[in-house]
Amino acid sequence: MKNHHPTSVLSHARLTAASVLFVVGVTMAAVAAGQGGGASSREHLLVGFTKRPGAAEHGLVERYGGKVRHSFPSVNALAIDLDSAKIGVFAREGGISYVEKDPVRKPLDLSTEQLTPSLSNGLYGLITTHAVEAQAAGYTGAGIKACVADTGLDTRHPDIAPNFVAGNDIFGGTNSVDVFQLGVAATETHATHVSGILLGVNNSVGILGVAPQAQLYEARVLGTQPDGSVSGETSQVMAGVQWLADQGCKVINMSLGGGERSRTEQALYQQVIANGHMIVASSGNDGVSHISFPAAYDVVVSVGAVDRNNAHASFSNTGGGLDLSGPGVDVLSSVPNGKGFEASVTTTQRFEAFGLEFAGTTRLRGITKTLVSCGLAVSPSDCPTTVRGNIALIQRGSVSFAQKVASATTAGAVGAIIYNNAPGNFHGTLGTATNNGRPWIPAVSVSQADGQTLLTQVGSSATLVNAASSWDFFNGTSMAAPHVSGVAALVFGKNPSLTPLQVESILESTATDLGPAGYDPTFGWGLVNAAAALNATP
């Protein structure tokens, strides 16, 4: 019997987040307001003067017992420390235009803020499936057990932990499914990503799932093999599904598959579904015209993948048994702590980026240098001498990514941005772990449109981020299936008395039709539509 494997295409695209230091002024209407009474303390302030600050202005600060920390003569300003009790009088001195707080800035990565879903980021699936509308209407999957049969899980991940209830390690024979306790965090990232898509918590960090208040039970049915691969026998998968059903799971997500039918497996899933537990599975990533098992069983809801433009993903298996489609290309979700990457480019605006495989990393605050165009960077001579110590902007084409980044490195660049020569972004690799024995510089990819915008900003400051994170982009029908499972959880949340077949009928009849009118083997009934499904739910 053929093993089941996770059905995601684990790209090395790196997570995009607002991992930059924003340096925008926050005007203080009246710093001195409310300063009366109470103990005073030293405050960090920005002071604007009517002229370029010189010795007299520095002396004024010192007369009030303050200290000049930084000088910005080009904008007639000083950064100072001053006792809070003296701010009011100081602000009324002649020659002072304003006094404002020196606000604290911090890296805005996914560990400090939650990404807002949009069509231009990795949470686009919540937009295209209309899940954001369903959540806004109050449907969050609260009280529904939405469960996953997959690899080990990061049970302490901030997007997972609040919804995680219990796990069962079928593969290892324990009740712990935590990847760090099991020592498999590097190889078993899959379940954490799938679970985040399904029910990532609506909190102040990370991502957001389709059913963010559903309860998660997880069965580890796929484990790390001696060669580092991840798989499990069908009997192990079946045991996990049975355990999840015994816990009362309304929806069981199976982002896994294999090529052989099993009468025993089919019979078990028929029984599980007849007992009120819906099973959703991935169609597979072989790009062929037949669906993997267990998705191919008639009773199982099979899901193929589309991208942010609702175009069919080339890797997604098709066939007459396909039921629905879900977002499965460049999907952002959780991964075990430190096993993902964040990537971005920021000038006057932030651009989504993917880190190139094997590229050097930065801290979350990134590296901020001048942006210099190197054209195609076929050779170091394509880069001007000003690239030394700065960030190279390179167009895709003519030679490999490795040659381009090596050329920029030889010319002295400390970072590289490669922009596409066709619409959209891309996932690239430098091919080898080192650049002829030397570490690669940080290097990321951006879309053609963003690259053309960056070309207009050559000579200005740019911040490049390619940093380790707890979130990442994956591709695959593994990512499409939990979008559908999440919408099913929303429907069950509205009416828990529905049967799995009734919920499946609702999802299929309300899906956004793609491709030829009506059913087709490429998209099934279409892209799952949360808002329409809930409107059709009695």
Image (spheres, rainbow, N blue to C red):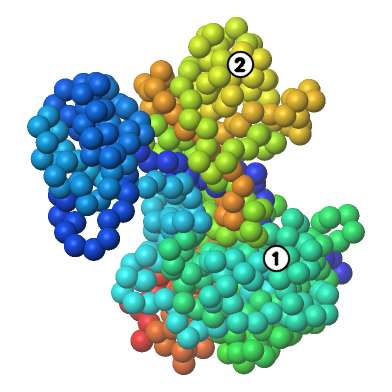
Q: Quadrant of the C terminus?
A: bottom left
| Pointer 2 local density, CA inside 10 Å: few below 14, some 14–19, many at least 20 | many
- Image position of 434 with respect to 83: above or below: above
Local crowd size for mark 1, using a 10 Å CA cut-off: few (<14), some (14–19), many (≥20): many
Can residue 300 be seen from the camera position used here?
no
Residue 517 in the image, given as x and y percentages of width and height: 42, 59
Q: Give x and y (percent) for residue 361.
A: 63, 38
Give the quarter of the figure containing the N terminus. bottom right
Dot in front, 1 or 2? 2
**Residue occupied by mark 2:** 412
Residue 426 is situated, as x and y percent measured from the top left of the image, at: 56, 37
Q: Residue at x 57, y 73 (%)?
A: 161
Q: Report the disc number at residue 187.
A: none
Q: 450 left or right of 47?
A: right
Q: Dot 1: what SS?
A: strand
Q: Residue at x 16, y 51 (%)?
A: 32
Q: Please name the residue shown 44% across and 29% down the image.
A: 462
The three-letter amino acid code for the residue at tag 2 is Gly
Numbered mark located on residue 256 in the image: 1
Label 1 close to label 2 by CB (< 8 Å): no
**Quarter assignment of residue 157:** bottom right
Q: Nearer the viewer, residue 223 or 517?
A: 223
Q: Nearer the viewer, residue 67 or 378?
A: 67
Q: Amino acid at mark 1?
A: Leu
Indicate which disc, 1 or 2, sits on the residue closer to the N terminus: 1
Tell me the quarter of the picture where residue 334 sits: bottom right
The percent position of residue 139, horizontal first and vertical second, equals 38, 77
Q: Regarding mark 2 in the picture, which secondary structure is present there?
A: loop
Q: CA distance from mark 1 to mark 2?
A: 45 Å
Asked which quadrant contains residue 409, the reply is top right
